């Protein structure tokens, strides 16, 4: 297979690329799933090769792919050199073997590794191991690079951040950015800190600087998308996510984020409508006890477990009138309460029926048809006792559907209809997956 030539770096060519070239190769490989797949195939083609140079190249390749155990095994067999020990230390650090990583880093200076670079890598390793004192000691040996090295200030910032010293971290990030305005890691961590502190505009500006140059930075794009979504700028958020998916089509977080954004874009907030809805909720939660009703009306409503205006909207005139001692006078009292508020008895039931009709139109015809067939069956199919059948006849209940539209209170309001008959009916319709209507 041809080597990846788009970035003009061949890990398995005649001579080993420089450390900077290997870093650029790693960035390129991880910039898209296609590149990662190509590079994985290239590593597999070379993995069986032996010899010091082959072990070194495949070890570095495996490290780039994140296969750290295999990388360490290959690198251990490679000929001693700066590149071997540096990448072996990196692999060990990823594996959590921090002491071995430090020992390996110390060997690199014997093979010409840059002192500042290795010291900073030691500081990183100690920081990963949560040995902040040791990390600080390493960085203290580099004070002559203050206001000179962006990487030095970046590592000072990362250590301060790990210790919760966020102001100190930001000061060092800013210094690093002055020394290297396009330092991607500095920009990312500054954006993240600004985001956490509530400075969204600054965070967006830093993230935009990252995504405008260099390889696709997935974390920056997704964090930027979150900020845009929070601001209601769904189109901008979507563009960030689509860019990630263009190069990483199977990225699970991006896939889920895309669905969230698309759902958000279809949402519409009608402030006036929501205000009306809030007022309506307050009204329907108003207790019945807040109104002046006759003792008879109050007692009847209490026995029927009707405690709020909302409960009245769940019951019809017929159901109220069928209850013992509830007559036309009490009915007029109830209507007097509801009408000034633009409400009426059975209002919620009507809304539910309308919603059911809409659901049927949306494709639930088959389910509705099956339920309708069951509800049209005669109550005689329930094989109830004589007393229960007689009570249902008095209420003109002929089908199972008629029965399920009645409440317990309505049935108990019929003369000679007691708890025994009620339990018999509930058990009979429960066997076929139905129940009496309740006011909840």
Image (cartoon, helix red, strand yellow):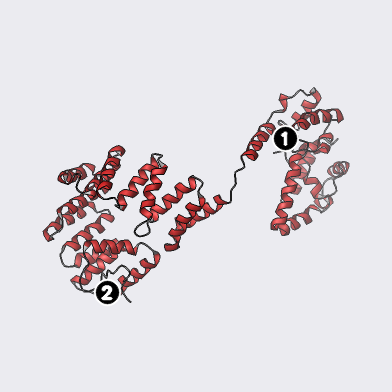
For the residues labelled 1 and 2, the Cα–Cα distance comes to: 77 Å
> Can residue 354 be seen here?
yes
Q: Residue placed at 80% from the left, 29% from the top? A: 336
Asked if residue 345 lies left or right of residue 91, the reply is right
Q: In this rendering, is residue 220 above or below 83? A: above
Contact (Cβ within 8 Å) of mark 1 with mark 2: no
Classify 10 Å Cα crowding around label 1: few (below 14), some (14-19), many (20 and above): many
For residue 282, which quarter of the picture? top right
Q: Position of residue 358 (x, y in %)?
A: 72, 52
Relative to 234, 17 lies left or right: left
Q: Position of residue 61 (x, y in %)?
A: 28, 66
Label 2 packing within 10 angstroms: few (<14), some (14-19), many (20+):
few
Between residues 96 and 285, which one lies in front from this camera angle? 285
> Residue beneath label 2, please?
48
Counting labels gives 2
Q: Which mark is residue 311?
A: 1
The numbered dot on residue 232 is: none
């Amino acid at each position: 297979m041809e080597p990846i030539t788009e970035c003009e770096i061949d890990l398995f060519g005649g001579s080993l690329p420089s450390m900077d070239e290997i870093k650029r190769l790693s960035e390129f490989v991880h910039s898209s799933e296609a590149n990662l797949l190509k590079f994985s195939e290239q590593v597999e083609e070379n993995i069986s090769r032996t010899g010091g140079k082959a072990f070194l190249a495949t070890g570095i390749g495996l490290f780039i792919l994140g296969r750290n155990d295999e990388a360490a095994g290959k690198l251990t067999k490679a000929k001693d050199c700066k590149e071997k020990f540096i990448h072996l230390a990196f692999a060990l650090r990823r594996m959590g073997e921090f002491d071995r990583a430090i020992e390996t880093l110390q060997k690199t200076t014997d093979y010409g590794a840059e002192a500042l670079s290795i010291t900073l890598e030691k500081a990183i390793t100690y920081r990963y191991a949560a040995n902040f004192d040791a990390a600080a000691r390493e960085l203290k040996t580099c004070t002559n690079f203050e206001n000179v090295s962006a990487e030095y200030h970046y590592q000072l910032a990362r250590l301060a951040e790990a210790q919760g010293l966020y102001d100190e971290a930001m000061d060092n990030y800013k210094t690093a950015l002055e020394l290297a305005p396009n330092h991607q890691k500095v920009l990312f961590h500054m954006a993240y800190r600004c985001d956490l502190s509530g400075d969204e505009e600054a965070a967006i500006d830093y993230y935009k600087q990252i995504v405008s140059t260099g390889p696709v930075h997935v974390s920056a794009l997704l964090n930027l998308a979150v900020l845009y979504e929070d601001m209601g700028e769904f189109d901008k958020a979507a563009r960030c996510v689509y860019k990630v998916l263009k190069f990483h089509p199977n990225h699970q977080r991006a896939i889920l984020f895309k669905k969230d954004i698309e759902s958000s874009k279809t949402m519409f907030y009608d402030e006036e409508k929501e205000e009306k809805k809030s007022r309506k909720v307050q009204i329907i939660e108003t207790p019945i006890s807040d109104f002046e009703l006759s003792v008879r009306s109050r007692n009847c409503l209490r026995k029927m477990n009707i405690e709020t205006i909302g409960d009245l909207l769940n019951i019809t005139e017929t159901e109220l009138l069928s209850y013992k001692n509830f007559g036309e006078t009490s009915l007029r009292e109830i209507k007097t309460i509801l009408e000034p508020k633009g409400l009426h008895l059975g209002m919620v039931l009507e809304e539910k029926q309308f919603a059911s009709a809409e659901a049927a139109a949306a494709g639930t015809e088959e389910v509705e048809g099956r339920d309708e067939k069951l509800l049209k069956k005669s109550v005689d199919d329930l094989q109830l006792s004589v007393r229960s059948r007689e009570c249902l006849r008095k209420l003109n209940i002929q089908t199972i559907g008629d029965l399920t539209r009645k409440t317990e209170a309505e049935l108990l309001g019929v003369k000679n209809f007691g708890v025994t008959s009620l339990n018999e009916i509930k058990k009979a319709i429960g066997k076929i997956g139905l129940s009496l209507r309740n006011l909840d």
